[in-house]
Image: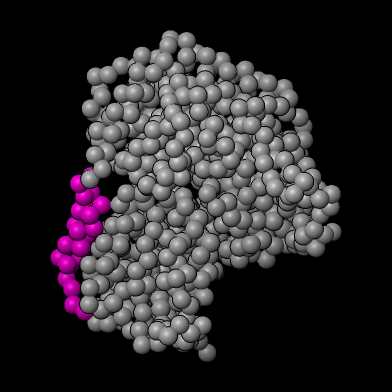
Amino acid sequence: MSQSLQPITPARNIANFAVELVVALGHDTVFSLTGGMAMHLNRAVAAHRGLKAVYCQHEQAVVAAAEGYAKAANFRKAGFAVVTAGPGVSNTVTSLISAHTDSTPLIVLAGQIKTADIDRWGTRAHGAQEVHSRELITPCVKRFERIGPADFREVLIDTLADAFRGRPGAVFIEFPLDVQGMPIEYEKADLEHAVAAVREKIDAADELGSRDKIATALRTLLAATRPLLYLGNGLRAACVDELIVEFARMHDIPCQYTWLSEDIMPASDPLFFGCPGGLAEISANRILFACDVMLILGGRLDLGTTGFQRHVFGAQAQRIVIDVDQPELDKFGELPRLDLVRADLHALPLAIEMVKDATSRASSDWLPWCQNERTEYLAEETRRMASDKMNVYNITRLFNGWADNKTWIPASSGYAEETFSRFFQPGINSRFFNGASLGSMGLGLAHSIGASFSSKTRICCLEADGGLMLNIQELATLTHYGPKGFVIFLLNNNGYESIRASQTKFFGGIAGVDAGSGLYIPPYEKICAAFDIDYTCIFTLAELSALLPTLAADAKPLMVDMRIDQFEYRGPGVKTIMSADGKPSSTPLSELNW
């Protein structure tokens, strides 16, 4: 006989104050997995009428979903997650690193064993389910704090502000069980005061002189003969991405991007010139190596983007790198023709206002030359690569014609992320993101589920058959919440194709990449049936082309199992060369060719 239970009611305690403060800051959704050491946090979440609680099946997915939520919200809101202590904390690590290294604002409230049980002697384990959370989590986040009873309000206010202050990132706030449940008195006015304090800290006066530094860089760009704007995701993180696009259009300045930022502008825009780098359109690299002034805003020039050759990435030009994070500037050392400017891109609106009367001195043939390079390359790419093969290139070409007004989330390092990202052309009002910096397998489904709670457009999750297995339990979360129009496009090539290709190339054999070499992946038709997910299987491009127009925006979640070729050429890219002593190196970036 089942017991009739009453709805959970709120309590006036520290846990409830923390949750109410996060909600008062404008956050309406929380991702969670309940646990005993977070019981008061769990109660506060469940009892808050203004908060949508989404319960995932694993803590890795909880935090990944929160990351997807924040990214789909264009970094205007932080992802919000609540987890329990011990393994609940340790399970979050991969997702925390993904969010933090992509500068995603994230707020994690975590349980902890009671204060008296926390290890003080350096034992391997003292309290029940205790992990050394401070040591474990601190390198993975922007800030870690453990809340005590004395100054909890001040610590909460300052830590929550850090999620957005300067370069955004993940903040992790831990509450020992006895502190969570500590009764306190507070009124609505106390929350309002705390919210004002958080926002005041976020909007604190700029101490870097950012406005003047950025204005100087903009003037240098406008004085160039062949100017180039390199727009990174830091612009979106600072909520100034739309403003820089207006600036570029006002002065007809060519723009290039990282894979994580390329949807700032639709590919159809006459100023869009793709993502240069080690795996790129040849035209993008030709433009990169032809400019004379390159202004890099919010782009880290990481090793993957630059083909492990950031020293030559547009090195013929005067390169101006603007970043708020000093270590990101320090990594460049003392490269020639490289100006490193520490400034906060939140000051970009003021800087643009300072140069409003300046005009571009670019050569009249610069933009047309860039446009001709891109047009000719894309035509050549079509001639060389178009076929009737069921591969990622051809699938992406079909998606490009269906890309408008959708949120696209490719996942995992390999075909689902790298190849799709390489060929995707962002449409009008389309969003495109992944876990770019870490490239972890298994986060795509959770990213997509989280995104469905903040995106105003339908979600298209691009996952690989191997990657989806790492968090396959989240199909239960997808079924339960049932976001309308949600589609999982599964790139199914019977295992880990990128690993299969590299092992074959360098070692002449394979291990742990498919059923024949030790890795079993069950049939997805049976998996979908078990989770009550609609399923269809696609074998040809013609079938996919016919399917896309029929996918209704209000339909229940669907998996489209696309049986793709195992081997695929990904177009121009630097080549990895393995020396006799096993050390890898890359071919020159400037020589990118077919």
Residue situated furthest bottom in the rendering? 1
> Is 329 included in the stretch rendered in magenta?
no
Q: Is 175 located above or below residue 455 in the figure? A: below
User: Which contiguous range is marked in magenta?
Assistant: 184-206
The rendered magenta stretch, by its main secondary structure, is classed as helix
Please indicate whether residue 512 sits to the left or right of residue 559 in the image.
right
Residue found at x 37% / y 51%: 168
Please indicate whether residue 2 sits to the left or right of residue 550 in the image.
left
Please indicate whether residue 392 sits to the left or right of residue 356 in the image.
right
> Is 198 included in the stretch rendered in magenta?
yes
Quadrant housing the C terminus = top right
Q: Along the line of sight, which residue is nearer the eye, 391 or 510?
A: 510
Percent position (x, y) of residue 548? Answer: 63, 39
Residue found at x 28% / y 34%: 213
Q: Along the line of sight, which residue is nearer the eye, 328 or 39?
A: 328
Residue found at x 55% / y 43%: 303
- The answer to whether residue 257 of the structure is visible from this angle is yes
Q: Is 587 located above or below residue 526 in the figure? A: above
Task: Write down the quadrant of residue 220 in the picture.
Answer: top left
Q: Along the line of sight, which residue is nearer the eye, 543 or 332?
A: 332
Residue situated furthest top in the rendering? 364
The mark total stands at 0
